[in-house]
Image (cartoon, rainbow, N blue to C red):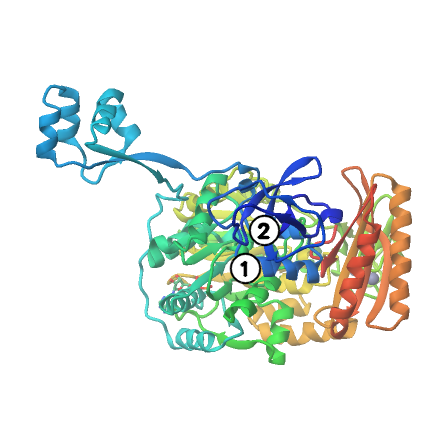
């Protein structure tokens, strides 16, 4: 028998299958140690065959007593290689806990001692050994860890009884259980008609279902009912949520419903915990996996449903190598298992909803909140008026008045500011005008070093403005405020209140997000100021007011999705108000109140927004009406990077001239010219969706050819947050 092995080095030259012989049997999917050149390396057996033309060496040994990847994962790796150009070795790494490689995590075993002999008979053997007798008399029913017994009775007593055959010692696995102190939440609800209909639709559709349900419509209950049914069918389930919404609340709900049958996979766990949970899933001891993005690789067999909650969330696109889109992996697993896939959101991504409209996905809606409350009323406040009236502060009059009222009533408020991206856009504070690219309709970014405005998609440059072309005002400014400044401002106006803030700076420590949120939930502060992190997944019953400062900020990221993201964020953050029995209100401050994003958001009119935005994408031929790929070319040697980028551009131009579906090519400096001493250039291309399958591999091939020291290239598909 010949074994086909992928060795664990991430290098495009060795990213292929190597043949080995072996004197003993090895199961496909096992990790093995093999000789490779003058070294010994770890690898994974991904197949077998009868014979080979090459001279083979023997596999040295099996590394684990379990099979690390199953047949589905091997198929998945082949798929990722073919369609996303991800190396075998890199995709195999995604399928197992990182520390398994190199044997850095082990199954934790401890000696466990049980009573083997009859107590009556045993007594007569230890009459003269008082310590042993004491241990025998007090021996706990069911047994105890050896170390615990030694701690109480001493080494010699324990050893004595074991040697006599009275006690029996055995190695058992100890499971490092994440969040063991967590109480299960066992609240039971009766599903309403909309929820029942959603469950039924999802279960009956052996395909992808989009669950569009307004915030608070009770999607979690739908997911759990679906999972329950899937378990009854004898199958397994994967439930994915954005990392940020893996709150203790969420875990508690799942533990409460499915108990120990839940395996948990997220980045906040220790390596040991992660390994134990993974092994528990691999061995079939957990049939429901709850986790963030990477849990889409959970080693479950016989999957019956995969659920992606908040499916529009950008965290489902991995931003570091290897770059993958969680939806693609889930779609592969759906086909492989012939199972259901659920994409749930109150604001589905345009791509997803477009497919639902075309009939590629099934659509089911939930339009009412489970608590029967109306959606909170959203007010749009025109900040330009405030400026004209001499208020240049960050809070408008309406928001201040509402804050005051909320605090007086003993309720809580959340203040949301948007602070992502690195770029500064230019804006007229008098009329709200923001300059945009004449070709791409995305906002231009100011580049201080050249004193120009630039489009990050096509690279076009525009003169810097010194007055607004719309109204002539010279009050042009670069927007940006931080949570800290907002907090100081609040303390100036309401010195007696307690304010908490939550953003990337305050949450470097592992648990502090949870700590801040739970402090707020307990009412230790009246106001929570935060960025993206406060948008998702938290249920605060006392929050009756949500304020959004400078809601336009996210409109002006130089990203074709910026309208979409803004709509999503406003809708999600507004959904935090009035979750309990109290009525909520939402105040959105903007310098651009007439923008259609606010018009539709205010009415909670997702479908209206979708129609409008989709039309624009069709006109500008951006996704879902095309596929965008970016080849990033970087090197410490600027000249080399530039030459490679030019070559890349020329090669892609050639493909364009063939008229096979690649219809636009632009080469330019990357938005951030230099990161960690590397110079960066990019080539951005647009591909017709019907030509994707034919053109994509050629783009990867072009980039791969140029990926030679000292130049590094990599390719992103529909890149999010281009840098
Ligand atoms: P979504 O994820 O759709 O925003 P959630 O799943 O968080 O909404 O549910 C919102 C709230 O409604 C939760 O507190 C949940 O317990 C409650 N809920 C869900 N379904 C029902 C129901 N059928 N009856 C009563 N309360 C429900
Ligand atoms: Zn103006
Ligand atoms: Zn442009």
Q: Is residue 108 above or below residue 67?
A: above
Residue 71: which numbered mark, if any?
1
Query: Residue visible at 47% across and 39% down?
Result: 272
Residue nearest the observer in this picture, 57 or 690: 57
Residue nearest the observer in this picture, 274 or 605: 274
Quadrant location, the N terminus = bottom right
Query: Residue visible at 36% across and 71% down?
Result: 191
Residue 455 seen in render? no
Residue 329 is left or right of residue 300, and the answer is right
Q: Which residue is mark 2?
A: 45
Q: Quadrant of residue 397?
A: bottom right
Q: CA distance from mark 1 to mark 2?
A: 11 Å
Query: Residue visible at 60% across and 56% down?
Result: 47
Front of the two marks 1 and 2? 2
Helix, strand or loop at label 2? It is strand
For the view shown, which residue lies furthest in the bottom direction? 359
Residue 342 coordinates in the image, percent (x, y): 51, 68
Residue 606 seen in render? yes
Helix, strand or loop at label 1? It is helix
Query: Residue visible at 53% across and 77% down?
Result: 363
1 and 2 marks in contact (CB < 8 Å): no
Neighbour tally class for label 2: few under 14, some 14-19, many 20 plus, Cα within 10 Å: many
Q: Is residue 486 above or below residue 604?
A: above
Residue 82 coordinates in the image, percent (x, y): 70, 61
Precedes in sequence: disc 1 or disc 2? 2
Neighbour tally class for label 1: few under 14, some 14-19, many 20 plus, Cα within 10 Å: few
Residue 148 is left or right of residue 541, and the answer is left
């Amino acid at each position: 028998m010949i074994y086909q092995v992928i060795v664990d080095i991430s290098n495009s030259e060795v990213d292929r299958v190597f043949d080995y012989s072996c004197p003993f049997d090895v199961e496909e999917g096992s990790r093995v140690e093999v000789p490779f050149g003058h070294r010994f390396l770890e690898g994974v057996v991904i197949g077998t065959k009868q014979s080979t033309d090459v001279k083979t060496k023997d596999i040295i040994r099996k590394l684990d007593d379990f099979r690390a990847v199953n047949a589905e994962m091997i198929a998945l790796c082949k798929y990722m290689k073919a369609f996303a150009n991800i190396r075998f070795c890199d995709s195999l790494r995604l399928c197992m806990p990182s520390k398994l490689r190199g044997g850095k995590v082990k199954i934790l075993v401890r000696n466990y001692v049980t009573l083997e002999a009859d107590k009556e008979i045993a007594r007569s053997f230890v009459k003269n050994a008082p310590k042993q007798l004491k241990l025998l008399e007090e021996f706990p029913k069911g047994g105890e860890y050896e170390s615990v017994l030694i701690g109480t009775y001493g080494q010699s007593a324990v050893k004595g009884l074991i040697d006599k055959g009275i006690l029996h010692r055995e190695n058992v696995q100890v499971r490092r259980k994440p969040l063991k102190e967590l109480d299960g939440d066992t609240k039971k609800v009766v599903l309403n008609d909309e929820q029942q209909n959603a469950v039924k639709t999802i279960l009956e559709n052996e395909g992808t279902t989009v669950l569009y349900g307004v915030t608070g419509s009770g999607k979690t209950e739908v997911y759990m009912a679906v999972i329950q049914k899937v378990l009854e069918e004898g199958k397994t389930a994967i439930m994915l949520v954005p990392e940020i919404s893996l709150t203790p609340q969420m875990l508690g709900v799942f533990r409460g419903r499915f108990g120990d049958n839940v395996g948990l996979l997220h980045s906040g766990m220790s390596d040991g915990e992660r390994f134990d949970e993974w092994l528990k899933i691999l061995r079939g001891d957990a049939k429901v996996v709850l986790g963030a993005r990477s849990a889409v690789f959970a080693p479950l067999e016989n999957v019956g449903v995969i659920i992606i909650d908040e499916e529009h969330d950008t965290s489902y696109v991995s931003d570091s190598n290897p770059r993958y889109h969680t939806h693609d992996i889930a779609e592969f697993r759906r086909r492989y298992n012939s199972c259901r896939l659920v994409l749930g959101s109150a604001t589905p991504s345009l791509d997803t909803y477009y497919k639902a409209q075309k009939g590629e996905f099934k659509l089911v809606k939930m339009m009412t909140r489970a608590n029967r409350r109306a959606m909170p009323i959203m007010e749009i406040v025109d900040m330009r008026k405030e400026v004209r009236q001499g208020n240049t502060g960050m809070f408008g009059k309406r928001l201040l008045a509402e804050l005051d009222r909320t605090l007086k009533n003993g309720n809580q408020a959340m203040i949301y500011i948007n602070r992502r991206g690195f770029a500064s856009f230019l804006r007229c504070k008098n009329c709200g005008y923001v300059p945009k690219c004449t070709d791409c309709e995305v906002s231009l970014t100011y580049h201080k070093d050249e004193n120009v405005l630039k489009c990050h998609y096509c690279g076009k440059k525009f003169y810097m403005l010194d007055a607004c072309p719309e109204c002539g005002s010279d009050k042009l400014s670069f927007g940006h405020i931080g949570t800290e400044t907002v907090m100081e401002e609040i303390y100036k106006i309401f010195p007696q209140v307690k304010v908490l803030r939550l953003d990337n700076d305050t949450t470097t420590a592992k648990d502090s997000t949870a700590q801040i949120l739970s402090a707020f939930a307990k009412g230790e502060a009246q106001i929570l100021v935060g960025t993206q992190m406060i948008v998702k997944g938290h249920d605060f019953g006392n929050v009756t007011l949500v304020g959004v400062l400078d809601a336009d900020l996210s409109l002006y990221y130089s990203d074709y999705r910026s309208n979409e993201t803004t709509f999503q964020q406003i809708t999600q953050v507004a959904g935090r108000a009035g979750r309990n029995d109290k009525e909520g209100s939402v105040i959105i401050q903007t310098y651009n109140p007439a923008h259609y994003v606010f018009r539709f958001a205010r009415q909670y009119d997702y479908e209206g927004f979708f129609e409008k935005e989709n039309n624009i994408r069709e006109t500008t031929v951006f996704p879902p009406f095309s596929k965008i790929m970016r080849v990033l070319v970087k090197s410490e040697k600027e000249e080399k990077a530039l030459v490679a980028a030019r070559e890349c551009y020329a090669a892609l131009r050639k493909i364009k001239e063939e008229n096979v579906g690649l219809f636009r090519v632009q080469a330019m400096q990357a938005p951030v010219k230099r990161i960690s001493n590397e110079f960066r250039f990019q080539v951005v291309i647009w591909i017709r969706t019907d030509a994707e399958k034919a053109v994509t591999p050629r783009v990867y091939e072009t980039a791969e050819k140029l990926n030679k020291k000292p130049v590094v290239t990599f390719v992103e598909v529909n890149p999010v947050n281009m840098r």
